[in-house]
Image (tube, rainbow, N blue to C red):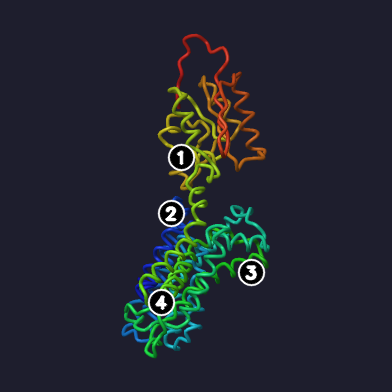
Amino acid sequence: MLVRRLHGTSAALLGGLAFAVAVQTSRWSQEARSYAMVAAVAVLATYLLVRAVEPDARRRWPWFACYVPAVMALGFLHLHGVLLVAAHGTTLLLMRAAPGIWARWLAASALAAAPLVPFALAAQDQTRQVEWLPEPSWDVVWTQVQFVCGSRPLVLPVLAIALIGAVAGFRPRAGSASGGTASTGSASTGSRRGVPLTAVAVPWLVLPTVLLLVVSMVGDPMFYYRYTVYTLPALGLLLGAGLAWLVALSSRRAVQAVVLAVALAALVVPSLEAHDVIRRVQSRPENMRKAANAVRNNARPGDAIVYLAGVVRWTAATYPDAFGRLDDVGMRVDPVTAANLKGRDVPPRDLRAKLARYDRVWVMNHRELDPHGPIVDRRELAVQAAGPWREVRTWTFRGGWLILFERVDVPRGRQRTST
């Protein structure tokens, strides 16, 4: 609906298809994280803004009223998503919005920001979670360009068609304010009633990334590629406008079909390898399925497991049917009660006594723990002190390792117990 309102039906159809088959759309739709939802809410918030600021809109306040919770949801899903508001302000500048529109938008933005301020202040305690973020550099910028386009081979065709779309969408299309299906030819005099697609798409695509990089240059790094997933729909807007313009170069349907086929091939063919890669296990930083299969095939009733840190428990929770069979002796408070994803662990000094009742114990590591810190080392020492054990088998998998220990010289008739 957004592209159709800004640039007509042809651009909407082609832009929607381009976005649907994009590499990053496939990549992040697979994730159980918030990035795809942030992108969806960003589209909604932008659509509401466009409806609210159209020059010939009859009633603006209902659209601004809906804009407020949309921006709130954007911030609560991911704080960086609020940078879309800066892009929306740039859109108003580019379209030379009237003072009344500015006043309504500022009021709506302030209302949306009110509950997000305490949320942002509370999030400052989590800065240690992002200490790994890269420092801004030209390599980071180039990687971001490849990320947005989908892969290195896609950079040239995607940017070329997007640039054509930015030029084609510089002026609003005739009938765009009423959701018409204007052609992709030259805009008529009456087209100035609408909102230019370029004024919406370019700030949305570029400004959040630029702001994150600038802030990272003057302070602590805050930028990472996936934090900008919500800007990718803007690229779909530009690609739709660019493809529609290319199709409209000729009035002959046969020529239009050839031009469209060539343009789509330029976008699709270079993306095939990237699409193949993201659908393979090797594209993920960890392969928990292999670890879960090891537990399914080798666990016995009454086996214990020691996760060397809470992050390992969090990762293992992706396969509760497998790891749920084991007694988590290292957990002091479960994640639900602790109101977090990792729970709380018992001190390493208490592990020896808890493991004394078990004949078999699994020990699981995670890539984020390498190199091991002091507390992780103490947990490993506590497990060994509860022995003697013999190592039954070690399973290595992408993202960590899993070892099964069995007690040496188990007294005959000893009963395995569980906590």
Q: Check disc 1: other Cα within 10 Å, few if <14, some if 14-19, many if 20+.
A: some
Q: Please identify the quarter of the rendering in which residue 139 is found.
A: bottom right
Q: From what the image shows, is residue 358 above or below residue 343?
A: above
Q: Mark 3 points at which residue?
A: 214
Q: Residue at x 67, y 40 (%)?
A: 371
Q: How much space separates mark 4 and mark 1, taking CA atoms? A: 56 Å
Marks 2 and 3 sit apart, C-alpha to C-alpha, by 28 Å
**123 and 156: which one is in front?**
156
Query: Disc 2 vs disc 4: which is toward the camera?
Result: 4
Q: Which amino acid does label 1 sit on?
A: Ala
Q: In terms of image quadrants, where is residue 248?
A: bottom left
Q: In which quarter of the image is the N terminus?
A: bottom left
In primary-sequence order, the first of circles 4 and 1 is 4
Say what amino acid the circle numbered 2 marks: Ser
Pointer 2 or 4: first along the chain: 2
Residue in the picture at 54% in, 21% down:
356
Would you say 134 lies left or right of 246 here? Answer: right
C-alpha gap between disc 2 and disc 1: 20 Å
Q: Name the secondary structure under disc 4.
A: loop
Residue hosting label 2: 29
Kindly indicate whether the residue at mark 4 contacts the one at mark 3 (C-beta within 8 angstroms): no
Quarter that holds the C terminus:
top left
Query: Residue 54 placed where, x, y %?
Result: 38, 82
Most distant residue in the bottom direction: 189
Label 3 SS: helix
Q: Quadrant of residue 182?
A: bottom left
Amino acid type, residue under disc 3 in the picture: Val
Q: Are marks 2 and 1 in contact (CB under 8 Å)?
A: no
Q: Which amino acid type is shown beneath numbered disc 4?
A: Ser
Of tags 1 and 3, the one toward the viewer is 3
